[in-house]
Amino acid sequence: MSESRVAIIGAGICGLSCAQWLQRRGVSVRLFDKARKAGGRMSTRRGPEVTFDHGAQYFTVRSDALGEVVQTWADAGVAKPWTGRIAVARHGSVTAKGDGVTRWVGTPTMSAIPRHLAAGLDVAAQTRVGAVERDHDGWRLIDTDGVTLGTASTVLLTTPAGQAVDLLAAAPQLAERVAAVEMEPCWAVMVSLERPWEIPADGVFVDDSPVAWAARDGSKPGRGARETWVLHATPAWTRAHWDDDAATVVQTLTAALAEASGVERPSLAHADTQRWRYARADAPLPERALWDPELRIGVAGDWCGGPRVEGAWLGGRALAERVLADAPNT
Ligand code: FAD
């Protein structure tokens, strides 16, 4: 069991940004994540000689704060703009979408960014927090077998909203706000192909189809020469097909992209899937973070303030600022 001033549950981009901001200001922080590695939805799946960004596809930067930090990631070699051709596919035709947006990705994979951030932080991976209880002078974190993982004077939850509610029994007012947030699911399909899929684009927003988005993942910088695609289903299709078997989902979604783009799909070399239960918030809360200064518990994530990587990163920093504003008791 370890003692830290601040315990953060969730080592996605929000938790990492929060931890980094606190640690730089001299606060002792420990992150806990149930997954094997930090990163959450900024993640990468590996296949035979291929990788897939199966969660976040790219991210945009609108704030100066993230802009400055992304430059440091680029300098460290873990982020680059993706200059893929972006288009809209609809009913058999593909139209280029020249929107002038800079789309950033991790290099050589999306997970390189969280890995870079986690390197200087204390992250307890493969550690699922099952409960957060009030102690005589702070908080006690307990795993799903009832074993105490650690104590902290401040606890911050940066998990998806549904998972945060489960841990907010001791803070019913926060729990009520968080419980109001709905998160949408997403079936993701990852394929590598025997030859290039001749769709005249690398990133495709798909209209009027079970597929919402598809990317030629191998067109992102540093991915290698293999022809790889990631397809994301719409939330409505995902809900209706949540229990379908993976092979059917691969066939249905790749056929839907072939139909929407008007380009036949080459033979599959490898296929994989992921069901994201909590992909994105339907209507995020307006605040970047919620903080209870009496109990010293707070929450943030992409379901507060903004439903993307940038929103999550800004939320982590906002939550850290709330904690630092009450620094005498941290
Ligand atoms: P997460 O990344 O979900 O991190 C939360 C962490 O909490 C996870 O690592 C999880 O393991 C951990 N956790 C949960 N419960 C517990 C527990 N009880 N104990 C311990 N750990 C726990 N954003 C964009 O900007 N651009 C895109 O193109 C884009 N596309 C997307 C496509 C998909 C399919 C998905 C799923 C997301 C996409 N996003 C995109 C959204 C983006 O990935 C998220 O906004 C961002 O990564 C959220 O970061 P976070 O830190 O708030 O949450």
Image (cartoon, helix red, strand yellow):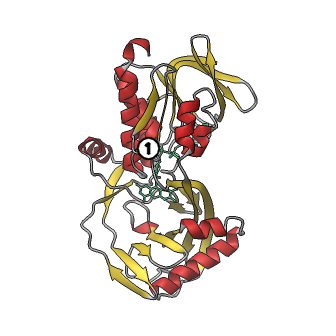
Write down the quadrant of residue 236 in the picture.
Answer: bottom right
Is 210 above or below relative to 263? above
**Which residue is found at the position 45% from the left and 77% from the top?**
207
Q: Position of residue 225 (x, y in %)?
A: 44, 69
Is 29 above or below relative to 192? above
Q: Mark 1 falls on what kind of element? A: loop
Q: Position of residue 17 (x, y in %)?
A: 40, 36
Q: Nearer the viewer, residue 237 or 147?
A: 237
172 relative to 322 in the view: left or right = right
Q: Position of residue 115 (x, y in %)?
A: 46, 42
Write down the quadrant of residue 105 in the picture.
Answer: bottom left
If the image is split into quadrants, where does the N terminus sit? top right
**Which residue is found at the position 44% from the left and 67% from the top?**
218
**Which residue is found at the position 57% from the left and 43% from the top?**
179
Q: What type is the residue that disc 1 sits on?
A: Cys
Question: Dot 1: few (<14), some (14–19), or many (≥20) neighbours within 10 Å?
Answer: many
Q: Position of residue 146 (x, y in %)?
A: 74, 26
How many numbered callouts? 1
- In the image, is the residue at mark 1 within 8 Å of ligand 1 by its beta carbon? no
Q: Nearer the viewer, residue 90 or 16?
A: 90
**Which residue is found at the position 55% from the left and 52% from the top?**
182
User: Looking at the image, can residue 253 be seen?
Assistant: yes
185 relative to 58 in the view: left or right = right
If the image is split into quadrants, where does the C terminus sit? top left
Dot 1 corresponds to which residue?
304
